[in-house]
Image (cartoon, helix red, strand yellow):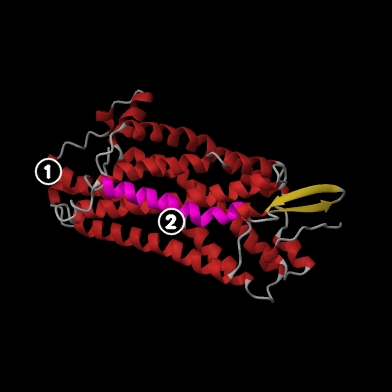
Amino acid sequence: MSYRLRVHCMIMNYTEEERHGLHAKASHRENIIFASFYILVFMVAVPGNTLALWVFCRQAVTSPSKLFLRHLAIADVSYVLILPVRMVYHLSDSHWPFGEVPCRLVGFLFYLNMYCSLYFMTCIGLDRLLALVLPLKSRSMRKTAYARAVVVSLWVTVTVSMTPLLFSKDQTMIFQVDNTTVVMCNQLYLENNSPKALVSTMVAFTIPLVTIVVSYILILLKLRGIKQKERPVRDKAIRMIILIMVNFLVAFVPYHVNRSIYIERHTHSDIETASIKALALANRVTSALTCVSGVLDPIMYFFLARTYQSILLQLYCIDRGDLLNFESHSKESEYLCLSAFYFL
């Protein structure tokens, strides 16, 4: 078995054996599992997020959270629409048939939409915190004009930050395996292992991590003050928070923790081939988990957005009153709890 490599600059210091470990093809079984996973996610996420985007775009933007929800849906739709290329890659047994430019584009869109989703979720959490904990004092801050400025700033900042991926050279690598040419795309699962990449990863993820955790902890503390008779309403709000946190913890935390370990370990010159293979597999798994957000977000929209909920129930011919008959509590207390969550 011989290998012909066009080696990207960030792996120049690896031996031939280590390069093989770093770019080792997934087994046939792994490829089937990954392809099946992406197909399942695509089938669930596309209709759910497309419907959400349609609903959110039809609504007037009267609050910051409505705007953040709309752009979260845009990021989710954009993300799940690139999943078919990953399906083809794994169904082709770890072969990239699309060429160099699409490889760069897929990597760019992956990071662009993932980080935009992450930061829009952060904005929603912060906005809900201000709406519930400081409803009067935060009115001057929570204006749609300011929210639009935040949205534009986020898209521009993340786009500019990820633009170098579009101009990275030699992002496809060619292997000759048993007289068969196999092309691999670095942008799918290979991480930049420079110290600068480690710092940028930590900074980019720490900000939303701290903001989301602190925001929902403070919201939970606020909800503790709800009277005994209003506990069903409070418990509903708590379940919403749990759903949001599960989404964040499953989709984003594993990837960034593993990415930090991946980059840190690859800075050591004595890293073993077995470790390289293990890190590569973990990176594929956690990278795949990021698209779970595309499945969980529509579930989150169902509980957070009344209009989305109503339309979805109408599609399935379900009476909303039968599903939500426990919403007969006092309007004032319900507003106190659920104004932090219902946006539309």
- Is 72 part of what is drawn in magenta? no
Kindly identify which residue carries mark 1: 332
Residue 9 versus residue 65: which sits nearer the camera?
9
Image x and y of residue 139, in percent:
18, 51
Kindly identify which residue carries mark 2: 249
Residue at (61, 60) in percent of width and height: 191
SS label for mark 1: helix
Q: Horizontally, is 222 left or right of 40 in the view?
A: left
Quadrant location of residue 134?
A: bottom left
- The residue type indicated by label 1 comes to Glu
Q: Which residues are magenta?
A: 145-166
Quadrant location of residue 285?
A: bottom right
Q: Horizontally, is 306 left or right of 187 in the view?
A: left
SS label for mark 2: helix
Q: Horizontally, is 23 left or right of 33 in the view?
A: right
- Is 149 part of what is drawn in magenta? yes
Quarter in which the C terminus is drawn = top left
Q: Using the image, determine if residue 331 lies above or below residue 178.
A: above
Residue at (56, 71) in percent of width and height: 195
Residue at (60, 39) in percent of width and height: 84
- Residue at the extreme top: 317
Residue 118 in view, yes or no:
yes
Residue 92 versus residue 236: which sits nearer the camera?
92
Find the distance from the CA under tag 2 to the CA under tag 1. 32 Å
User: How would you classify the magenta stretch by its main secondary structure?
Assistant: helix
